[in-house]
Image: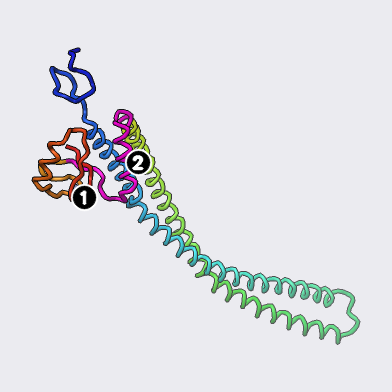
Amino acid sequence: MTPESDDSAPGPVSGDEVPRTSPLEVLAQIGDLDVRLDQIIHHVRNLPEREIRAAIEAELGVLASEAKVLDAQIADLERQQRKHEDEVARIEAKRAHNSERLYGSHLTSPKEAEALTAEADALGRHQTDIEDQILELMEELEPLTDARADLAQRQSSAAGRMATVDAAIGAAESEAGGERDEVLDERAALVASADPALVSIYEDRLAAARGTPVLGRLIGLTCSACHLEIPSVDYERITNLDPDELAECPHCGALLVR
Ligand SMILES: [Zn+2]
């Protein structure tokens, strides 16, 4: 250990000692990590799968409305069919009762037999009419139930695609979450090694910035935040400042790391 290797000033580095990172450089590294955090959030929010998911959701909505209309039509026809079938059952019961009387031993006159026969004929015709109506209803129902089955298949296919997209979104979110945690750990380590006053200035500026750059590196004469060249008189002044002293880009106001 040499006498001049204290940590009160950056000073010239001697031998193979690791150079001390300047406080502004630590801040710039924190700034780079914050940019990465923003990129991770932006990436997760704008996954292409989200658009696909929204399209499938809309498709499922349309299919559900179509299904609702079809289900109502089918239910209505089935209700009519059941009503007719009940009617047929009632007629059949009546016809059975009639023939029991007609062929049983309770008849009192030929006139009664005639009346019963006439009624049986009328009941038979009525039953045929209703059975024809049932057949018509069934014919009407068939294309609707076919369409409903087709719709159910399309719903199931869309639901399957939705599950695939959801799984992809879940995987991307979990991957981004892992990446974010790594960056946050790295950031916390940097913050722990940084000058707290500088970090606090940076974070205050970041909170007030609303998307405008807070930090920029001086690369040659250019500010990396706004990509504008700094006038040579400002450049002279800034580069002659003490390395820990803060300087702003005269164009965008970003703290300049140099
Ligand atoms: Zn600038």
Q: Which mark is residue 176?
A: 2
Residue type of the residue flagged with mark 2: Ala
Judge whether residue 162 can be spotted in this image.
yes
Residue 148: percent from left, percent from top: 50, 64
User: Quadrant location of the C terminus?
Assistant: top left
* Image quarter of residue 215: top left
- In primary-sequence order, the first of circles 1 and 2 is 2
**Relative to 14, does residue 248 appear above or below in the rendering?**
below
Image quarter of the N terminus:
top left
Give the residue drawn at x 57%, y 69%: 72
Left-right relation of 70 to 1: right
How many dots with numbers?
A: 2
Compared with residue 76, is residue 38 higher up or lower down, i.e. above or below?
above
Q: Which mark is residue 252?
A: 1
- Does the magenta run of residues contain 208? yes
Which portion, as a residue range, is magenta?
189-217
